[in-house]
Image: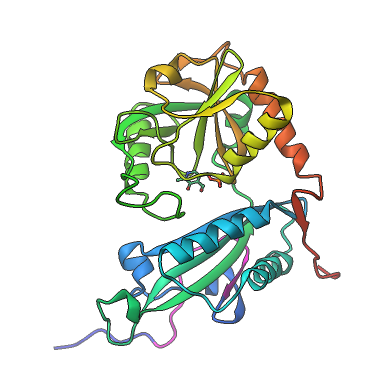
């Protein structure tokens, strides 16, 4: 009987976006950042993370992302050997070393593992990883211009009393099922339901309706998005009314405008939901105004943290 050989010089056949990661005290090329297949983060989705973006060489609302990440760690009984200032420095270094002026930046903590493969999460050594890769958006440039085609899926978002949605997490099987549902219906992305049959959120984004100049966004079973929060801040400044509460599929379909929000894309217009078209199908005036003000905020020091890049790139 012959056995396969154990590889001594493994070459990873997969492709990675160009970027820099941080793991175990070292800065690495993206392709060299690895996680053990025995890490609970991989085996059980036992992880929390946050995504912040860098636009024109500056982080946007970094403090809010750090707040959410550190709150998630605490709720999950996880610890990392870095404080907020040190995490901010690590993220900045990842971006600076990557050279990306527009970047998608993640900080992640996985439960980790233990040498005995213990079933007790308290025996695991938590693992912190960070990385910076080129900026990515939920909507591509064509969808940004004409609005996304969205389908409402019957899939129910994991209940908030099972997985606390305020802890940013990788429990995405409901969202991915919703996406495939949407593809089957000829749509480009999905909105899935809360446990009461109202709209919750989509794969990586929150949603807003605009009806008679008033905004509304779902309350139950959603991640309190930082882009969503930024819309609240803008509405406050603009004196536009915004409420948080149930958004039924009927309310959504009867809206004048609909848009979705994410760090990956900002404010993104929706043109149709289940083949119901909003207005003349083009992004509506309030969506357009909020989108433009959102990107204006990226130019102000009040909301941004500049990255200093190595001089010789
Ligand atoms: N909802 C979910 C499930 C998400 O994963 C995300 C972002 O990744 C959002 C909403 C939007 O949150 P934010 O605006 O903070 O990016």
Q: Is residue 198 in view from this perspective?
A: yes
User: Is 11 inside the magenta-drawn segment?
Assistant: yes
User: Is 88 inside the magenta-drawn segment?
Assistant: no
Quadrant assignment for the N terminus: bottom left
Which residue is pictured at 57% across the width and 67% down the height?
Answer: 130
Q: Quadrant of residue 10?
A: bottom left
Nearer to the camera, 166 or 156: 166
Give the residues in magenta.
8-22
Which residue is pictured at 53% across the width and 27% down the height?
Answer: 243
x, y percent for residue 175: 37, 43
As drawn, the residue found furthest toward the right would be: 311
Quadrant assignment for the C terminus: bottom right
Nearer to the camera, 285 or 223: 223
Decide whether the magenta segment is chiefly helix, strand or loop: loop
Which residue is pictured at 57% across the width and 55% down the height?
Answer: 51
Where 233 falls versus 68 (above or below)? above
x, y percent for residue 86: 66, 73
Nearer to the camera, 63 or 288: 63
Say whether residue 261 is left or right of residue 39.
right
x, y percent for residue 17: 58, 60
Q: Is residue 105 in view from this perspective?
A: no
Which residue is pictured at 63% across the width and 25% down the height?
Answer: 287
Q: Quadrant of residue 283?
A: top right
x, y percent for residue 62: 67, 56
Where 53 falls versus 87 (above or below)? above
Where 36 falls versus 88 (above or below)? below
As drawn, the residue found furthest toward the left would be: 1
């Amino acid at each position: 009987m012959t056995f396969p050989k154990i590889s001594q010089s493994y070459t990873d056949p997969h492709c990675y976006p160009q970027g820099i990661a941080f793991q175990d005290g070292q800065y690495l090329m993206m392709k060299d950042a690895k996680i053990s297949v025995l890490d609970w983060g991989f085996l059980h989705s036992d992880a929390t993370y946050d995504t912040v973006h860098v636009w024109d060489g500056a982080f946007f609302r970094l403090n809010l992302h750090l707040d959410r990440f550190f709150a998630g760690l605490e709720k999950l009984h996880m610890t990392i050997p870095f404080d907020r200032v040190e995490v901010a420095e690590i993220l900045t270094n990842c971006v600076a070393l990557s050279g990306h002026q527009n970047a998608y930046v993640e900080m992640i903590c996985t439960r980790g593992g233990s040498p005995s493969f213990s079933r007790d999460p308290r025996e695991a050594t938590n693992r912190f990883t960070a990385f910076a890769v080129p900026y990515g958006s939920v909507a591509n440039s064509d969808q940004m211009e004409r609005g996304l085609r969205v389908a409402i899926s019957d899939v129910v978002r994991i209940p908030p009393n099972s997985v606390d949605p305020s802890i940013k997490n990788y429990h995405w099987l409901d969202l991915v099922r919703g996406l495939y549902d949407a593809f089957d219906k000829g749509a480009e992305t999905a909105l899935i339901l809360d446990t009461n049959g109202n709209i919750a959120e989509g794969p990586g984004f929150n949603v807003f309706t605009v009806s008679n100049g008033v905004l509304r966004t779902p309350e139950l079973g959603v991640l309190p998005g930082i882009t969503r929060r930024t819309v609240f801040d803008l509405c406050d400044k603009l004196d536009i009314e915004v409420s948080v509460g149930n958004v039924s599929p009927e309310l959504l379909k009867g809206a004048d405008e609909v848009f979705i929000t994410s760090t990956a894309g900002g404010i993104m217009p929706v043109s149709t939901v289940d083949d119901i078209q909003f207005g003349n199908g083009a992004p509506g005036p309030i969506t357009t105004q909020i989108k433009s003000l959102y990107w204006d905020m990226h130019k102000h020091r009040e909301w941004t943290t500049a990255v200093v890049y190595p001089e010789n790139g």
